[in-house]
Image: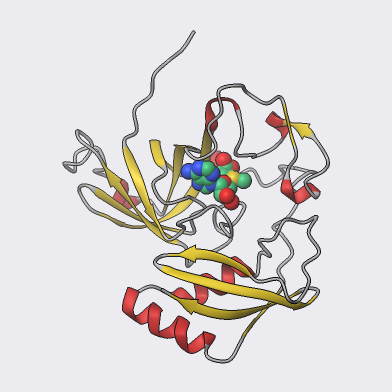
């Protein structure tokens, strides 16, 4: 049996590529985006009342990870990328129907736009549904997840000569907290856990319209090298 779904909107996100997007929402509060609603959801009726809500669930498609053959087992990066796990025991992107869910902060509501932050969504992500976060039902204080028991350990983020000034200038131009966004995302240590980075290896990711480059001068430390358009 197959059912068709139609996006209610698309996310314009600070994340222009998958690399360096946090593994879950809330980990980078400076990660902002705009959910552009499509007709008929864009005239204000469908979002009326959302101004009374601080967070929403976004149900979306991992549109850049869709597969025709569903995987039953996956290799979660946080387990080092070599340990397999049943797909339903993970929040992996490659999953049956490619459906993701993220609870994000709702910063502003307009008739056809929701301004959100603390997101973990790639630019262009199709959103299938929006639901208000209901704390008494959604927050389970005694919940346990022994696989993903805590947020990733943060590492130190240093700034190379000139890189911080570049980030400040582009942040001003973009009217975005770019310095905080870079620090919050890189502190999550985006490189694959199985990779031991040599200091000479340079990594990069696109945030908004700038290319951020960094390296690991020593284990557990990231140094931002450049922030350039
Ligand atoms: N919070 C969601 C969930 O639990 O379903 C997503 C968790 S998933 C591990 C988060 C990762 O999905 C991000 O780090 C990013 O690499 C990837 N991602 C985000 N948006 C995507 C998209 N539209 N297509 C494919 N991958 C995406």
Q: Quadrant of ligand 1?
A: top right
**Outermost residue toward the front?**
200
Q: Quadrant of residue 145?
A: top right
Q: Position of residue 81 (x, y in %)?
A: 77, 46
Which of 116 and 204 lies nearest the eye of the viewer?
Answer: 204
Q: Quadrant of residue 21?
A: bottom right
**Outermost residue toward the bottom?**
161
Query: By what rule are the colours in the image chosen?
Result: secondary structure
Q: Is residue 186 above or below residue 152?
A: below
User: Horizontal placement of 42 versus 94: left or right?
Assistant: left
| Position of the C terminus by quadrant | bottom left
Residue occupying the point 46% across, 81% down: 167
Which of 92 and 209 lies nearest the eye of the viewer?
Answer: 209
Specify whether residue 20 is in view: yes
Q: Position of residue 187 (x, y in %)?
A: 65, 70
Q: Is residue 183 above or below residue 151?
A: below
**Outermost residue toward the left?**
43
User: Horizontal placement of 79 versus 138: left or right?
Assistant: right
Residue occupying the point 79% across, 47% down: 79
Residue occupying the point 81% across, 74% down: 219
Q: Is residue 4 above or below residue 157?
A: above
Residue occupying the point 53% across, 32% down: 66
Q: Is residue 77 above or below residue 19?
A: above
Q: Position of residue 100 (x, y in %)?
A: 53, 38
User: Horizontal placement of 41 versus 69: left or right?
Assistant: left
Specify whether residue 130 is in view: no
């Amino acid at each position: 049996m197959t059912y068709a779904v139609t996006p209610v909107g698309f996310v314009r996100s600070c994340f222009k590529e998958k690399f360096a997007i946090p593994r879950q929402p809330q980990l980078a509060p400076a990660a902002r985006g705009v959910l552009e609603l499509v007709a008929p959801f864009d005239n204000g009726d469908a979002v009326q009342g959302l101004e009374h809500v601080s967070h929403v669930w976004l149900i979306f498609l991992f549109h850049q990870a869709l597969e025709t053959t569903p995987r039953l087992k996956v290799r979660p990066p946080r387990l080092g990328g070599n340990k397999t796990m049943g797909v339903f025991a993970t929040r992996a992107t490659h999953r049956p129907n490619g459906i993701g869910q993220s609870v994000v902060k709702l910063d502003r509501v307009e008739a056809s736009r929701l301004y959100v932050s603390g997101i973990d969504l790639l630019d262009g992500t199709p959103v299938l549904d929006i639901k208000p976060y209901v704390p008494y039902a959604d927050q389970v204080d005694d919940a346990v997840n022994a696989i993903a028991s805590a947020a990733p350990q943060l590492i130190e983020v240093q700034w190379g000569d000139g890189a911080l000034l570049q980030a400040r200038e582009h942040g001003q131009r973009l009217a975005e907290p770019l310095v905080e966004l870079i620090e919050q995302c890189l502190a999550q240590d985006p490189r694959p856990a199985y990779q031991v980075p040599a200091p000479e290896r340079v990594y990069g990711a696109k945030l908004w319209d700038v290319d951020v480059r960094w390296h690991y001068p020593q284990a557990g430390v990231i140094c931002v090298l450049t922030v350039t358009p």
